[in-house]
Amino acid sequence: MKILLVGSGGREHALAWKLSQSVQCDELFCAPGNAGIAQCATIVDIAESQIGTLVEFAKTNQIDLVVVGPEAPLVAGLADRLADENIPVFGPSQMAAQLEGSKGFMKRLCTKYNIPTAAYGEFSEIETATTFIKENGAPIVVKADGLAAGKGVIIAQTIEEAIDAAQGMLSSSDFGVAGEKIIIEEFMDGEELSFFALTDGHSVLPLTSAQDHKRAFDGDKGPNTGGMGAYSPAHMFSDELEEKIMETIIMPTVNGMKEDDCPFSGVLYAGIMIVDGIPKLLEYNARFGDPECQPIMMRLQADLVEVLYQAARGNLESVVDDVSWSNDTAMCVVMATNGYPSNYPKNTPINGLEDAPQGEDICIFHAGTAKDENDQIVSTGGRVLGITARANSTKEAQSKAYNTISHIHWPDGFCRKDIGWRAIAAENDSAPHRKIV
Ligand code: AMP
Ligand code: GLY
C-alpha cells in the first residue's frame, strides 16, 4: 500500500515509525514531516493547511490510505475532500471533528445522550455569562468554544477572574473567532487521565490510556504547554475503569453521533476527570494526543496499517481481535527549546543523536527538527524531540529515557526531569503489596 501521513510533529513521527513497520506498507509519504520522519518516510513539501494540494497529491500518486495526524486539517474538511475522491482516510469528517472543534457541540451531545460531564452554560453575551458566574460562584471554568491551541481554558479561582476571562474571550480580543462563543462550566476536582478508542462510525475498538504533563516545569509548575511528557498506561487505569468509560462515555458518543447523522470515524481521544470514582468527560479531541501517541505506539502490538485502513473503510470489526498491548509502561520525555512555551530561538544545533542508545524499546521521535545546508540537525519549533522508552516499570522506562537524553547535546534545549513522578510514587507505594501477591 501507498500511504500518506499528514503532519509534522512527534505524534506523526511515532505514527510513521509504526506504519513503516507494517508488511503492507510499500511506500510511506509524509507531508510536511520533519528530519526524524525522513528516516522512515519520503518527505513531501506540502503544508497541512494546503487541503487542495494534499488531495491532488493523493490522487496523482494513487495513495491507498491517508492518515491525518493533527486536528486543523480535519476541522478544515480534509477527510471530506478525500472521501469525495474515494480515497480511504483515517480521520473524521469536518462535521464530526466538531467534537474537538466546538466545545458547545461536544457539550450538547453530552446533554442529549446523558454522557457524564461538568454542568455548563453556553454564552455569547457578557451579561448572561456574568449572571451565570455569579449564580454558580468560583472556582469555575471558562472556555473558548473553538480551537485555541490548548490555551482556551481558564480555571478561575474568583468570580472577578471568571468575569474577566469571559469578557476577554467574548470581546474577541483574547482568542479571535474561537472565543465568540464561550462555555462556562462547573470545576471538577479529581484525577485526570486520557483514554483513546478507534471507531469507524459504528464499531468501536478501545485502545488504552495515557497521562500527560501539561505544565512546562518540574513539579507540574509553570505555564501550560502542549505537553512536556506522557506515559501509558495511566497509573490509575484499570479494567473496571475502562469498562465504565466505554459504557458511559465512548459508546454513547459513537452511537449518538451515528444517530445524529454525523458518524465519527477515526480516533476519539477523551480527556477524563475521575470524580469520586466516576469518569466524567472533560473534552474530546478528534486525533491522537501529542506526546501521548508516542508511548501508545510503543506499546501497541498490531499492524497499524491494517488497523487504520480497516477503520477508514468502515470495517474495524475485522481487526478488533488483532490488537493487543505490551504490559510494559512506555514514557515519552519531551525536549523543548529554551523559552518554550513563550518566545524561543529557531535553528539551534542539536548533536549527539546518533550516539544515543536506541532500539525497539527506545526511540528518539522528532517533533520540530530540520537539516540545515550542512546536514546539521537543527530545532525548528518549541517542542523538538520526544525521547520514548518502554520497560516493565515506570521507573525503569523513565531511567532509560533520561539515560538517552544524557547523550544529546543541545545547549538551547531543556526537558522536565520528573516525567511520570505520580506513577512512580504509586509504584513505590504498591511495591510491598506486589511482593505479598
Ligand atoms: P480541556 O482543553 O477542556 O481539556 O481543558 C484543559 C485542562 O483544563 C484539562 O486538562 C483540565 O486539567 C482542566 N479543566 C478543563 N475543564 C475542567 C473542569 N471542568 N474542571 C476542572 N478542570 C478542568
Ligand atoms: N497532549 C495534549 C494534546 O495532544 O492535546
Image: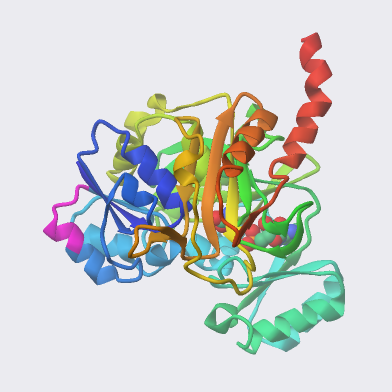
Residue 62 visible (yes or no): yes
Q: Position of residue 99 (x, y in %)?
A: 50, 60
Apparent side of residue 17 relative to residue 226 in the rendered image (left or right) = left
The residue segment tinted magenta is 57-64
**Residue at the limit of the structure toward the front, as seen here:** 374
Q: Residue at x 13, y 52 (%)?
A: 62
Q: Residue at x 46, y 65 (%)?
A: 380
* Vertical comparison of 299 with 353: above or below: above
Quadrant of the frame with the N terminus: top left
Colour scheme shown:
rainbow
Q: Residue at x 79, y 51 (%)?
A: 219
Residue 118 visible (yes or no): no
Picture quadrant of ligand 1: bottom right
Apparent side of residue 142 relative to residue 27 in the rendered image (left or right) = right
Tell me the quarter of the picture where residue 168 sits. bottom right
Q: Nearer the viewer, residue 152 or 114?
A: 152
Q: Position of residue 139 (x, y in %)?
A: 84, 66
Tell me the quarter of the picture where residue 24 sits. top left
Is 429 covered by the magenta stretch? Answer: no
Q: Position of residue 276 (x, y in %)?
A: 81, 42
* Vertical comparison of 298 with 283: above or below: above
* Vertical comparison of 373 with 249: above or below: below
Q: Position of residue 36 (x, y in %)?
A: 39, 50
Q: Nearer the viewer, residue 359 or 110?
A: 359
Tell me the quarter of the picture where residue 222 sits. bottom right
Apparent side of residue 135 relative to residue 252 in the rendered image (left or right) = right
Quadrant of the frame with the C terminus: top right
- Count every numbered label the image shows and give the total: 0
Q: Residue at x 47, y 67 (%)?
A: 347
